[in-house]
Amino acid sequence: MAGYKSPCNKVPIEDLIMALLSTTDFPFLIEKNEGFSHGRIDLHCHTHCSDGSLSPQTLIDRAVNYQIEVLAITDHDTVEGFNIAQDYILEKNIPIKLVSGIEISTAWQGFEIHIVGLNFDINNSTLQQLIASQQQAREQRAITIGEKLVSCGFPDAYHDAKKLAGTGTITRAHFAKVLYQQGHVGTMQKAFDQYLGKKGRNTQKAYVKPQWCSIEQAVEAIHVAGGSAVMAHPIRYDLSAKWLRRLIVHYKESQGDALEVVLPQMNPQQRQIMLNYCLEYNLHASTGSDFHHPNKWSDLGRNLILPDGAIPVWAMWE
Ligand code: AMP
Ligand code: MN
Ligand code: MN
Ligand code: MN
């Protein structure tokens, strides 16, 4: 394995199977570490290539410490972290299988729905075009957010947020951090509550409607690139049961492959509800921490076991 790099950035399935089989209790070996359970697979996390705080290299080091064997970096509308992390893994001969990943923002019925793509060719031209247009939409939205924040009395917010984002994807989290660091709000959450966010039909002062692609376009691009599409964190969209079902029906009609059934903060009942949707609509199940930065409540690979009966998304890669 050492030194091997597959031509299209996809993890050869044999490597994936070997990584998983090398644990004694496939697919999860639960370790007790500082009182927390750690699984060995995490298919949703962020680096400073978008709104995470760690570099891809530091993230990989952290994943090694948590004994993660299969990891997907899923930054917002970018795959920039993949090659950096993969080069580091090869250079240091680190025993982690890196699965290519992305989290694409989409628009559906006035909601922002995140679609995670996994195990695709990062150089695929259709996907690259979609990424370019999403980046353009992000830049345009950031400029308009900046203009609105000028009216709120923060003339340098756009400049400061761009500086914080560096060469990575600019997100509202960067604006939130700027407002927090400069003492204009007490927490980043308050920056969303008071300026950047939208709750139901209620938009805050610096909210700007984004021009994201549709769910169908995101799923299609992921498929054209040879990957699997996962609906990220279905429980976080603040939808009633009726609307969540509508979303899942639409997602299935759009050829979506899987739902994120497990996030660290979900309780067993919530996991079971998501699993039931998977079974009802014949969808695979994925799991990931949505790790952005070290904090008390969640970390890479923590508390990510799929419930019994779930068909894992990685079964599609066999
Ligand atoms: P964007 O994709 O540019 O809209 O940025 C949204 C990102 O901000 C999310 O991926 C989260 O990481 C972060 N975030 C933190 N708190 C909130 C919140 N209350 N609402 C939306 N996004 C939040
Ligand atoms: Mn984020
Ligand atoms: Mn998300
Ligand atoms: Mn995420």
Image: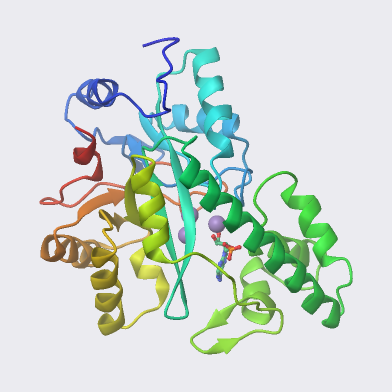
Residue 263 seen by the camera: no
Q: Nearer the viewer, residue 36 or 184?
A: 184
The quarter of the image holding the C terminus is top left
In depth, the one of 66 and 119 nearer the eye is: 119
Task: Tell me: 77 left or right of 261.
Answer: right
> Residue at the bottom extreme?
201
Is 244 drawn above or below residue 291 in the view shown?
below
Question: Which quadrant of the figure contains the N terminus?
Answer: top left
Residue 47 at x, y percent in the picture: 58, 43
Which residue is located at x 15 percent, y 64 percent? Answer: 281
Left or right of 78 in this view: 221: left
User: Where residue 220 sits: x, y (%)?
Assistant: 36, 54
Query: Where residue 308 sits in the image (x, y, percent)?
Result: 12, 50
Q: Is residue 196 above or below residue 128?
A: below
Which colour style is shown? rainbow
Question: Measured along the vertical axis of the image, is residue 201 above or below residue 245?
Answer: below
- Tell which of 159 and 236 is nearer to you: 159
Q: Nearer the viewer, residue 264 or 310?
A: 310
* Mark count: 0
Kindly identify the residue that appears in the image at 88 percent across and 66 percent down: 156
> Which residue appears at 33% of the width and 39% of the height?
226
Q: Position of residue 117 (x, y in %)?
A: 39, 48
Q: Residue furthest top?
A: 2
Q: Is residue 56 visible?
A: yes
